[in-house]
Image: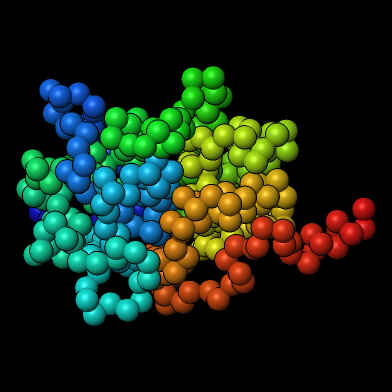
């Protein structure tokens, strides 16, 4: 089977466990005149999917750092078929949100895979988002979300107004705490929902879903101790960005689609729920980059092995509660105290 015909929709290994593929493109944008990829306005293009939590990280950081005029982006359509992510067409009317358009950089490219094959005709990995592309050299800089967001923290600071340049999402005084949080939230929560949902044996599913909820319990306890409103206090940090993109999808998709249903966020985790709503409603970088139509349709209509009839559940309603609102059971519990 040729690399351009490989089946990219097989998610689980032979033992029933989901294992995330390592990113291949790992270069870096730097504020150096002799850099291979120097920080320049409008030189790079960011390809994302509103559905994807890993790509969502990059959109949040782009907005937090005020990079809207420096780094344009395009979101693919929410549907992933056998050829991977496709770009929206002018005829598509089911994919709301900014910049859900045909590829503005390559007029004849219909799928994200074409960008990968432009970079390497023999590429055999997955065609993932976010993908950071250099329009000048016509090549991929990076497709590793954790590194893309970090290069956006300071690489463009010399071009930004002071209020954005001074925003530090990985401050030195919190770096060790953030790194520690990242380690277990990545393995057990960010990736844990996928390890639960794509498991193909009862044993793999049970093991991973229990680990997921044990770590949600840990996050709940840590947020109960945080002075807030963010995970590590009064400053938004990388820890908030990385956790938010999974938690905002949890009730809307992961509870039912990935069988992560021991508890939901809105009724089972009051401190996580409070933190989630603060990020969403009070910080535009979080709320304005969240597109629930893409999120719900992608998972339920792209994963045929999980949902063969592509039926998208109506609930939960609403996808996220207002800032001060609670579900009836929580309201009743609070009133009885």
Q: Position of residue 331 (x, y in %)?
A: 81, 62
Look at the image and tell me in which quarter the N terminus lies.
bottom left
Q: Is residue 248 visible?
A: yes
Q: Tell me what residue is drawn at x 67 percent, y 38 percent.
A: 228
Quarter residue 6 falls in: bottom left
Q: In terms of depth relative to the viewer, which is nearer, 249 or 205?
A: 249
Q: In terms of depth relative to the viewer, which is nearer, 147 or 74?
A: 74
Q: Is residue 214 visible?
A: no
Looking at the image, residue 143 sits to the left or right of residue 13; the answer is left
Q: Is 113 situated above or below 90?
A: above
Quarter residue 73 falls in: bottom left
Q: In terms of depth relative to the viewer, which is nearer, 223 or 83?
A: 223
Q: Position of residue 104 (x, y in %)?
A: 16, 60
Q: Position of residue 68 (x, y in %)?
A: 32, 49
Q: In terms of depth relative to the viewer, which is nearer, 273 or 7?
A: 273
Q: Tell me what residue is drawn at x 17 percent, y 43 percent.
A: 43
Which residue of the protein is positioned furthest toward the right in this rendering?
A: 336
Q: Is 17 situated above or below 235?
A: below
Q: Is 152 situated above or below 179?
A: below
Q: Tell me what residue is drawn at x 38 percent, y 44 percent.
A: 66
Looking at the image, residue 70 sits to the left or right of residue 116; the answer is right
Q: Position of residue 89 (x, y in %)?
A: 22, 73
């Amino acid at each position: 089977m040729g690399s351009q015909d490989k089946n990219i929709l097989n998610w689980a290994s032979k033992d029933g466990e989901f294992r995330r593929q390592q990113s291949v493109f790992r270069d870096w944008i730097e504020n150096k005149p002799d850099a291979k990829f120097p920080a320049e306005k409008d030189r790079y293009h960011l390809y994302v999917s509103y559905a994807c939590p890993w790509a969502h990280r990059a959109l949040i950081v782009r907005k937090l750092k005020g990079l809207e005029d420096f780094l344009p982006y395009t979101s693919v359509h929410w549907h992933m078929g056998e050829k991977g992510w496709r770009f929206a067409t002018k005829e598509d009317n089911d994919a709301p949100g900014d910049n859900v358009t045909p590829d503005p950089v390559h007029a004849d490219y219909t799928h994200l895979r074409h960008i990968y094959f432009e970079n390497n005709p023999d590429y055999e990995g997955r065609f993932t988002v976010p993908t950071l592309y250099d329009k000048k050299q016509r090549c991929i800089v990076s497709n590793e979300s954790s590194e893309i967001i970090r290069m956006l923290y300071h690489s463009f600071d010399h071009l930004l107004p002071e209020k954005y340049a001074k925003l530090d999402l990985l401050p030195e005084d919190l770096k060790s705490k953030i790194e520690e949080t990242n380690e277990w939230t990545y393995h057990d929560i960010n990736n844990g929902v996928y390890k639960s949902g794509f498991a193909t044996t009862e044993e793999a599913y049970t093991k991973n879903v229990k680990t997921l909820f044990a770590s949600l319990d840990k996050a709940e306890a840590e947020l109960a101790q945080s002075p807030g409103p963010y995970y590590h206090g009064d400053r938004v940090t990388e820890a908030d960005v990385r956790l938010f993109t999974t938690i905002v999808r949890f009730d809307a998709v992961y509870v039912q689609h990935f069988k992560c249903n021991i508890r939901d966020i809105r009724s089972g985790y009051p401190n996580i729920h409070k933190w989630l709503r603060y990020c969403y409603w009070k910080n535009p970088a979080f709320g304005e980059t969240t597109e629930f139509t893409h999120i719900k349709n992608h998972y339920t209509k792209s994963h045929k092995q999980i949902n063969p009839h592509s039926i998208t559940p109506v609930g939960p309603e609403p996808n996220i509660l207002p800032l001060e609102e609670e579900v009836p059971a929580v309201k009743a519990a609070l009133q009885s105290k």
